[in-house]
């Protein structure tokens, strides 16, 4: 019996011998497959949700996400993107996604063709994407010509759509309700329903609502003070395909978060509300050899930060709105398209009231910017696809809020070589530009971050990069190995140098609050994946440096960026112990992020003044966390389309006390010290019940 794949199976078909290739992903694990009644083989089923390529792209099927650890009843897609090589792990305080050493705002997060400007919620557990509403996730570490102008990576969530409309009938789809899911837990609940009344129409709706403080109020303790927090995510998708040539899609998303925090030692109360929305309407015309897609998109993010402390009040409103049109034509090996976007941007605009001092702030005005892009890509294969060359490029015209015009060319070249059927090598050269940028107190993707436009003083960001990639697998498809290395040179990098209290005590100006300089990112990552068998998952290691150099700082040498993790180990494992019982585990062990330590403190006129050392000259201790979960499926044999069960999980199973950052702590008795701040430092248990139809 043959054990390796691809299998070359010779079968008798109409008296003619034909060679066929059977791939592992099309057959069940370790089962006999009968072909034409003449031959049978044994094949391994690929149970891993990951699908990769040497071009640095990862394809993820959302239905397979259920095989990964569901922590707090949720297997979040962005959380597992963070476990991939060259993608940095975030903490309970860091809601960002850092790809190849880039900042959070240098990545693009897409719902179809619409941008989601803030894809994360607090705590680092949930993202804005309800996985059951989407069919696939595509991740690339480099933004291609057809994607938004970003220096980092791109995460694209693709909603469900009609695949074969105009042919199907109700007889072929007996169930009008094509699928439904419901998950109820003590921290949040979510549900999705997919309705297909006929072969031409598909409707999908999903909702998620969190009620964190209902049962977890004692755990949501931030440095001795309670944090009140809740959020909701809502999605709607409508796909209509009247014929084989035409398809109309409508996708919409809305999310809202509410958080409040009171600290008694500083007599400070903070309230933070923010919301996201994204929508697209697309029309797709398909032919045998070409496809034309047109989209209207609208996206927005709005933040309302308010602080009240001892006779002082401050609010920091900010928002960004995008309206645009996109068109793309695909024909054989060609991809040609264009886009136009109108941005309405209000950067962080402090509004301060104080009974002690009169603070003047440079109040920001809402600005309008325009961006137009034309791009093209071509793919050429030779030697029966053994070599693949893909040159692509984007030409951008940008008119900023000061009516200054910018022009740029962003080329990319990808070359890959299929050395053997199981091994492929690749190299990428790229130049990227970014005009709409993000910054804030942390640059970690928290909701206090805000967006701003490039201008005469704040020039567009630019990056030149080189990436080397390798992926391979064993002949039986049971194991896969990937490795990549990168170097990226950055220009006109921005870093916010003030903190929230500086806005109360000093005059504010956006231009003077930002540092501008250069950057250099380099590193490599390796990952070993087990794709079949009772135990699946992956283990990975990444090394990376993210260095920045700003002339305004007194240090002339480069220093690490706020999010840099030099070393990082990740483990994700799933064990199918019994037919209906699955044990899962995820673990991360990473070096600490840098911070600026205070060397001395002075007491002047009743105020504590700190003298700080070298910028980002110290590092937090290593970050450690292990999460575990078990899923029990209670599926009934007679009910083929109905499944239900429960999930038990333990977040931070071993109760590692991970410092998030250091700050000056003033006690009620007047003593003070520079001490670490921790959050979610105890194991967080959860029990949830799910229903799937």
Image (cartoon, rainbow, N blue to C red):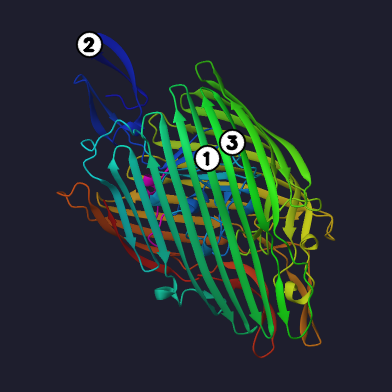
Which mark identifies residue 146?
Answer: 3
Q: In the rendered image, is residue 103 in sight? A: no
Classify residue 504 by image quadrant.
Answer: bottom right
Residue occupying the point 17% across, 49% down? 639
Of marks 1 and 2, which one's residue comes earlier in the chain? 2
Left or right for 236, reference 270: left
Of marks 2 and 3, which one's residue comes earlier in the chain? 2
Spatial separation of the CA atoms under disc 1 and disc 2: 47 Å
Residue occupying the far bottom of the picture: 669
Classify residue 117 by image quadrant.
Answer: bottom right
**Residue beneath disc 1:** 295
Q: Is residue 541 above or below residue 678?
A: above
- The boundaries of the magenta stretch are 61-75
Residue occupying the point 35% across, 47% down? 203
Q: In front: 115, or 379?
A: 115
**Residue beneath disc 2:** 14
Q: Secondary structure at mark 2?
A: loop
């Amino acid at each position: 019996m043959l054990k390796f794949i691809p299998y070359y199976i010779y079968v008798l078909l109409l008296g003619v011998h034909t060679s066929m290739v059977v791939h592992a992903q099309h057959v069940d694990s370790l089962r006999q497959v009968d072909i034409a009644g003449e031959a049978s083989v044994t094949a391994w089923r690929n149970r891993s949700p990951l699908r990769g390529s040497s071009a640095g792209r990862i394809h993820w099927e959302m239905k397979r996400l259920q095989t990964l650890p569901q922590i707090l009843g949720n297997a979040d897609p962005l959380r597992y993107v963070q476990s991939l090589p060259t993608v940095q792990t975030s903490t309970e305080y860091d809601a960002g996604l850092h790809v190849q050493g880039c900042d959070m705002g240098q990545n693009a997060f897409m719902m179809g063709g619409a941008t989601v400007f803030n894809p994360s919620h607090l705590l680092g557990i949930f993202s804005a994407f309800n996985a059951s509403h989407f069919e696939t996730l595509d991740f690339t570490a480099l933004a291609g010509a057809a994607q938004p102008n970003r220096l980092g990576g791109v995460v694209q969530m693709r909603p469900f759509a009609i695949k074969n409309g105009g042919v199907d009938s109700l007889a072929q789809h007996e169930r009008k309700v094509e699928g439904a899911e419901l998950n109820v837990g003590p921290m949040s609940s979510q549900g999705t329903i997919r309705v297909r009344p006929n072969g031409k129409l598909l409707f999908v709706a999903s909702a998620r609502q969190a009620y964190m403080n209902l049962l977890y109020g004692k755990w949501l303790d931030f440095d001795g003070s309670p944090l009140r927090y809740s959020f909701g995510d809502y999605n709607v998708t409508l796909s209509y395909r009247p014929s084989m040539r035409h398809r109309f899609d409508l996708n919409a998303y809305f999310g809202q978060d509410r958080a409040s925090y009171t600290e008694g030692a500083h007599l400070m109360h903070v309230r933070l509300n923010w919301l996201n929305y994204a929508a697209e309407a697309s029309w797709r015309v398909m032919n045998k050899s070409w496809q034309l897609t047109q989209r209207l998109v609208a996206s927005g993010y709005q933040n309302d930060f308010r602080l009240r402390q001892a006779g002082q009040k401050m609010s920091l409103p900010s928002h960004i709105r995008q309206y645009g049109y996109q068109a793309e034509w695909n024909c054989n090996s060609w991809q040609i398209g264009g886009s136009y976007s109108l941005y309405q941007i209000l950067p962080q605009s402090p509004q301060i009231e104080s009974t002690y001092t009169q603070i003047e702030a440079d109040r920001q005005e809402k600005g309008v910017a325009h961006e137009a892009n034309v791009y093209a890509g071509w793919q050429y294969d030779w030697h029966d696809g053994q070599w693949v060359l893909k040159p692509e490029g984007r030409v951008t015209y940008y008119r900023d809020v000061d009516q200054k015009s910018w022009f740029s060319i962003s080329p990319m070249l990808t070359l890959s070589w299929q050395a053997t059927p199981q091994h492929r090598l690749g190299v990428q050269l790229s130049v990227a530009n970014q005009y709409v940028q993000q910054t804030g107190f942390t640059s970690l993707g928290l909701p206090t971050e805000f967006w701003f436009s490039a201008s005469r003083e704040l020039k567009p960001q630019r990056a030149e990069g080189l990436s080397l990639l390798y992926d391979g697998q064993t002949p039986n498809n049971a194991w896969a190995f990937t490795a990549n290395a990168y170097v990226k040179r950055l220009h006109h990098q921005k870093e916010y140098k003030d903190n929230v209290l500086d806005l109360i005590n000093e005059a504010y100006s956006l231009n003077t609050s930002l540092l501008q300089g250069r950057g250099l990112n380099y590193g490599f990552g390796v990952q070993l994946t087990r794709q079949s068998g009772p135990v699946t998952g992956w283990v990975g290691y990444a090394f990376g440096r993210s260095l920045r150099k700003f002339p305004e700082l007194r240090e002339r040498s480069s220093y690490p960026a706020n999010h840099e993790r030099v070393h990082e180990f990740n483990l994700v494992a799933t064990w199918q112990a019994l037919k209906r019982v699955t044990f899962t585990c995820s673990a991360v062990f990473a070096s600490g992020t840098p911070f600026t330590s205070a060397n001395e403190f002075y007491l002047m006129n009743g105020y504590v003044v700190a003298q700080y050392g070298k910028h980002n000259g110290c590092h937090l201790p290593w970050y450690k966390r292990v999460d575990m979960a078990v899923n029990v499926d209670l599926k009934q044999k007679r009910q083929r389309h109905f499944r239900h069960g429960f999930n038990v999980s333990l977040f931070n199973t071993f109760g590692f006390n991970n410092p998030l950052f250091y700050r000056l702590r003033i006690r009620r008795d007047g003593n003070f010290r520079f001490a670490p701040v921790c959050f979610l430092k105890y194991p967080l248990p959860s029990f949830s019940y799910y229903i799937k139809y």
